[in-house]
Image (cartoon, rainbow, N blue to C red):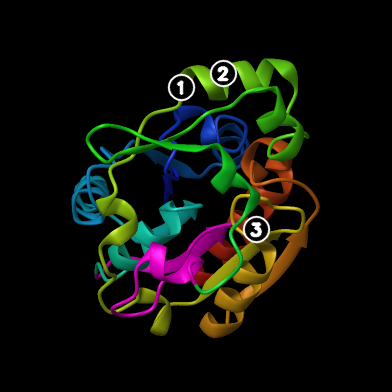
Amino acid sequence: MEIILVHGAGGRPTTWSAVAPLLTAQGHDVVTVTNPMTSLEDDVANTLAAVEDTTGPVLLVGHSYGGAVITNVGRHPRARGLVYIAAFAPDEGESVTEIVERYEPAEISKYMRRGAGGDWKSEPDAAFWAEIGWDLSPEQRAVVQAEGRAAEDLIFKQATGIPAWRTLPSWYLLAEQDRTLRPEIQADMAERMGATLERVPGSHYTTLVHPERVATMITTAAATVTS
């Protein structure tokens, strides 16, 4: 079983830096994808290319916006399951923007800045860390800030095709104090999918704050789809 890890809109390699070693230590083959974040279609194509570079069945794991990517990539014939870590899980014809606009704005909206070309990037100052990522260490914050990349508006606006969660088993790890993707949105998407749901305390940086819980859910999903 190959495990494909897909980051969110920040596009940070460190998203999975604490999780991937736990998975490889258990003997799993792990692929960490870095997407261009130019559009949902481009990111799906880039992740599909990573799947094509593997040879066996795959388990797809997405954090945040990465959930929208795996929802589409999961239509690949070798995909066996989907794991969402505080992630979006759109339905057919639905975009990330359409999901969040049905709810009250999350606190992260105060810190998002739009570039001249229409791209988006967060502005992490002291207030940002106190409200959005309070549970990261100063060292983690420095790395996250240094690695942050802008994301084109099309990753949020393009609609999803037939969602793979309609036919594949899915798991969802919900961040209970998430101020980037509201917990009630996470709960509603997990229920709609019929996903196996677990909850952890903390912010949207779940993969860095609770790597053991994330790795445990992934290995449980891998064992389930393998058997």
* Residue at 25%, 63% in the rendered image: 158
Residue bearing the label numbered 1:
147
Mark pair 2, 1: CA separation:
6 Å
Q: Are marks 2 and 1 in contact (CB under 8 Å)?
A: yes
Q: Nearer the viewer, mark 1 or mark 3?
A: 1
Q: Nearer the viewer, mark 2 or mark 3?
A: 2
* Placement of 77 over or under 21, stated as above or below: below
* Placement of 101 over or under 41, stated as above or below: below
Residue bearing the label numbered 3:
217
- Mark 1 surroundings: few (<14), some (14-19) or many (≥20) residues within 10 A: few
Snapshot quadrant of residue 26: top right
Apparent side of residue 186 relative to residue 100 in the rendered image (left or right): right
Residue bearing the label numbered 2:
143
* Residue at 72%, 43% in the rendered image: 212
Apparent side of residue 15 relative to residue 43 in the rendered image (left or right): right
Helix, strand or loop at disc 2? helix
Q: Position of residue 160 (x, y in %)?
A: 29, 70
The disc at residue 187 is: none
